[in-house]
Amino acid sequence: MKKSVSYKAFLAVNAAVLFLLSFLFLAPYVHVIAKALNQAKDTDLGGIALWPRKLTLDNFAVILTNDGFAGSFLITVA
């Protein structure tokens, strides 16, 4: 079955809109992850978009060694 020109145009526009929406929905999450993986002092300077400039896991170490984290995590799981 041969596809019409209008159907091909619909598929192209549909794919472009879905790609744009996917990017718009995922970009904030990628931004938060980039800030979490960047050095805190460098993040304060700004300019972090979708990729960390200075990759580190120190931010996660600070959170995981916090005394209140375990209790908060257990409340969340419960």
Image: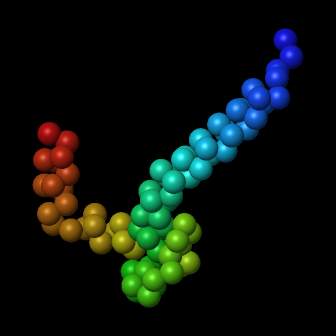
Q: Check the image and tell me how it is coloured.
A: rainbow
Residue 76: x, y in percent? Answer: 18, 46
Q: Is residue 21 above or below residue 61?
A: above
Q: Quadrant of the C terminus?
A: top left
In the image, is 31 to the left or to the right of 61? right
Quarter of the image where one finds residue 16: top right
- The residue positioned 82% from the left and 21% from the top of the image is 3
Position of 59 with respect to 25 (left or right) is: left
Residue 55 visible (yes or no): no
Compare residues 21 and 59 and report the one nearer the observer.
21
Rendered residue at 36%/72% (across/down): 59
The location of residue 41, given as percent across then percent down, is 40, 86
Residue 63 versus residue 21: which sits nearer the camera?
21
Front residue of 30/14: it is: 14
Residue 32 sits in which quadrant?
A: bottom left
Q: Residue furthest right?
A: 2
Image coords of residue 6 (percent x, y): 77, 29
Q: Residue furthest front?
A: 6
As drawn, which residue projects farthest toward the top?
A: 1
